[in-house]
Image: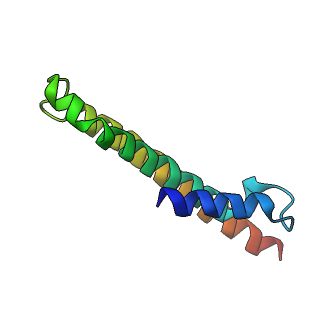
């Protein structure tokens, strides 16, 4: 998902059709998916270290990170939906 999100963003940056990326729904979806999956991947990459050093025995750190990343993902999806609704009203 990280790779596909990056490819989607690269495609948007190369595309000259849109004047601003902030009104493009695909930008918001790719950004949300990228942040969510990059955060999860980073935590899982260091998971063994957390367990060996007893830093996250009860998974409170994981729950905190996961909840914040879900908030970012759903916020980006909500913005994308609002951008879609706004662009339909203009046409």
Residue 30: x percent and y percent?
A: 58, 59
Quadrant position of residue 51: top left
Q: Is residue 3 above or below residue 36?
A: below
Quarter in which the C terminus is drawn: bottom right
Q: Left or right: where does residue 62 sit relative to residue 34?
A: left
86, above or below 73, in the image: below
For image coordinates 82% across by 55% down, the residue present is: 20
Looking at this view, is 72 or 46 the one in front?
Answer: 46
Q: Residue at x 86, y 64 (%)?
A: 16
Q: Is residue 78 visible?
A: no
Regarding residue 2, the answer to whether it shows in the image is: yes
Q: Is residue 83 left or right of residue 14?
A: left
**In the image, what residue occupies the spot 63% across and 63% down?**
8
Q: Position of residue 83 (x, y in %)?
A: 68, 62
Query: In the rendered view, how is the structure colored?
Result: rainbow
Which quarter of the figure has residue 13? bottom right
């Amino acid at each position: 998902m990280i790779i596909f999100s990056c490819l989607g963003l690269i495609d948007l940056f190369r595309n000259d059709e849109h004047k601003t990326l902030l009104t493009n729904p695909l930008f918001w979806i790719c950004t949300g998916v990228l942040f969510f999956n990059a955060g999860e991947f980073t935590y899982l990459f260091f998971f063994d270290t957390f367990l060996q050093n007893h830093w996250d025995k009860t998974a409170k750190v994981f729950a905190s990170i996961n909840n914040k990343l879900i908030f970012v993902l759903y916020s980006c999806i909500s913005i994308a939906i609002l951008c879609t609704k706004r662009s339909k009203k203009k046409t």
